[in-house]
Image: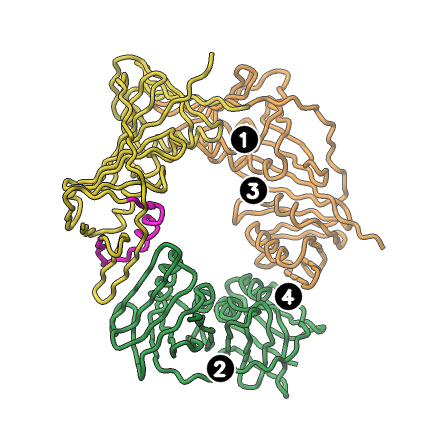
Chain colours: A green, B orange, C yellow
Amino acid sequence: MFKIVVEDARRYKNATDAIVNLIDEGLLEIGKDGLFLRAMDPSQISMVVFSMPASAFMQYEAPLPPAKVGLNFDSISKILSRSRAGEKLEITKADNKLQLKFIGQRRRRSFKVPIIDMPAGATKEPSVQYDALVKVSSTHFKESLRDALLVGSHITLEASEKGFAIEVHGDSSDLTEENEMQSEEVIEMKISKPARATFPLEYLEDIVRACPDNSALTIHLTTDKPLKIEYEVESAKVVYYLAPRIEAD
Amino acid sequence: MFKIVVEDARRYKNATDAIVNLIDEGLLEIGKDGLFLRAMDPSQISMVVFSMPASAFMQYEAPLPPAKVGLNFDSISKILSRSRAGEKLEITKADNKLQLKFIGQRRRRSFKVPIIDMPAGATKEPSVQYDALVKVSSTHFKESLRDALLVGSHITLEASEKGFAIEVHGDSSDLTEENEMQSEEVIEMKISKPARATFPLEYLEDIVRACPDNSALTIHLTTDKPLKIEYEVESAKVVYYLAPRIEAD
Amino acid sequence: MFKIVVEDARRYKNATDAIVNLIDEGLLEIGKDGLFLRAMDPSQISMVVFSMPASAFMQYEAPLPPAKVGLNFDSISKILSRSRAGEKLEITKADNKLQLKFIGQRRRRSFKVPIIDMPAGATKEPSVQYDALVKVSSTHFKESLRDALLVGSHITLEASEKGFAIEVHGDSSDLTEENEMQSEEVIEMKISKPARATFPLEYLEDIVRACPDNSALTIHLTTDKPLKIEYEVESAKVVYYLAPRIEAD
């Protein structure tokens, strides 16, 4: 049995959305240090690793050993968005369902959603030696992805001594964006070797969507290797991996 | 012949929407005391009774005997939303059509819509002895319906000494809401006997839609009997009835 | 070769939209005095004549003789809407494509779109002797078109000593609007002979869409002849012609 109390359900929703944008269903681990989830999207092209410390909650009681709870995060996100001002949220297990109980002064609203039977997959994080780190402004990077979307479906990211560049080659149009090392978009860059790889734009958009505006988002890049993107949303830490598209020569 | 002059067409639209949300076409009675309409929705599950006193209008001239005018309220609502600041609206009969004339200082806009031949149905209001009256905040009750919509298509309303409760049982999820007698949602309750019945959510949403925010909405309930809901919108008074779903045992 | 530098890409987009609302592709002439385009919409019912003086640009270098560049204005409009604060825009020809380069302080974004092979059509402006000129408020005239859209698909415009009138006869409803010579809608009128003609509403809406709100729009009218509408948007001047619908007797 477990019991988690959230003071601001809306903020907890923002964190949950970092999962929802990539996967509908997943296995959430409720351990003594906090919540943890690692899952691949259904197409196996991207992976999300989500962790939220016990300290982020008003009250946090985990079972021993940790519980693994199969959940539909899409349903949960919709329920979390129903929170109202002045209510706290209590998450427990009841009747073999997950119970989300909004507690107001003279009103109680209690949603129950099914706990899904799911295999505990042996998802491993890719082990890549990264050659380049680019810390970008989330707002600017999201705008760059919107630029890219006008032109094509795949985007090439490149980090070199010249800075951070983006290229898109569509059916009829092309886009190149060049950002100097210290620019509107780039907060920090560290490069041991130039790196360049191409990714499906749609996945990249899903990955950055939950990142709050005007915050930092860190991109790790090695030529033709999976991309790693990290950021924080509310008190949660999220790490994403995304497989590159390798062109046949 | 009749002539009705409206000072603020936009407010008159809000009142008309209390009809439109349930029925497209209906027979409006233009009597000496004001406007009156009673109609069932096409599926015969719900009924609206609408009345607006002559005093709500800038000028009101009714025929003797009262006129019964078959109208498409959907068209009329769209036309009313075309009102502009500083215009008054004159409603008359012209060429066997209903004429809505917006009169500005140096501009006249005149819409004519057909008068529809409709049988004067013998719609009778259900006569139910109500066991419970619950006066709720319109804003909070609309939010509760939105909660319910996440979970299922039918909603159970229950009034008892414990307060006012809502239950929804969907295919996979469930919702219960409990409001104490005096709470964020409940303004007033009077109960002679506990009452509980289940209704189609979609109709309930249509019924409350025209109710202004932050105002009161009165629910009359008897176990497994049609629900009665009343509220005021601008100067109009609306009463709705909605048939319950009775479960086979 | 040519080079055009735009200080405010967003304003240049507004001007371009006066073309886009009617045609997707067209032949833009880059001459020494400025930009020029004349084209019919694909259905050959309406024509747009667009001109923007060299003085409207921060820098303007035209080739001799003038270049005629076939462009997809829809793509270009979408790219122009990607401009960000503090960037200037440089338009040149590169690799036989049109290059739109947004130049920020430490960032360069460069879109390339194809130059399309198009025949230099011999589009001639209709030569009509106009009997009536009506200068209307763009905001009010757009509202009148929205009124009309509720009722039917064709609109009759009429200018006479009584003022400027609009009529729409739909399948079931009708609309008449009468504006006196000096009214909320009419800024100025000059009439040598009364004029009245009927036009497809949808085209008229496309024609006025790019006209800024609260500005003037001039309508030239002769009975059963093509309509001429002129207005300015940013520094561009646009003239439209629209063929009337002539009823068979």
* Part of the protein shown in magenta: C70-92
Label pair 2/4, CB-CB below 8 angstroms: no
- Say which residue label 2 marks: A126
Label pair 3/1, CB-CB below 8 angstroms: no
Nearer mark to the viewer, of 3 and 2? 2
| Residue type at the position of mark 2 | Pro
Do discs 1 and 4 share a chain? no
Answer few, some or many: residues within 10 Å of disc 2's Cα (few below 14, many 20 plus, some between 14 and 19): some
> Please, what secondary structure does the residue beneath circle 1 have?
helix
The residue marked by circle 3 belongs to what chain?
B
Do discs 2 and 4 share a chain? yes
Quick check: C43 left or right of C190?
A: right
Answer few, some or many: residues within 10 Å of disc 4's Cα (few below 14, many 20 plus, some between 14 and 19): many
> Please, what secondary structure does the residue beneath circle 2 have?
loop
Where residue C247 sits, quadrant-wise, is top left
> Please, what secondary structure does the residue beneath circle 3 have?
loop
Q: Position of residue B230 (x, y in %)?
A: 63, 42
Q: Position of residue C151 (x, y in %)?
A: 49, 27
Nearer mark to the viewer, of 1 and 2? 2
The residue marked by circle 4 belongs to what chain?
A
Nearer mark to the viewer, of 3 and 1? 1
Disc nearer the start of the sequence (2/4): 4
Q: Nearer the viewer, residue A156 or A19?
A: A156
Do discs 3 and 4 share a chain? no
C204 versus C4 height, above or below:
above
- Say which residue label 3 marks: B210
- Say which residue label 1 marks: B75
- Say which residue label 4 marks: A110
Do discs 3 and 2 share a chain? no
Nearer mark to the viewer, of 2 and 4? 2
| Residue type at the position of mark 4 | Ser
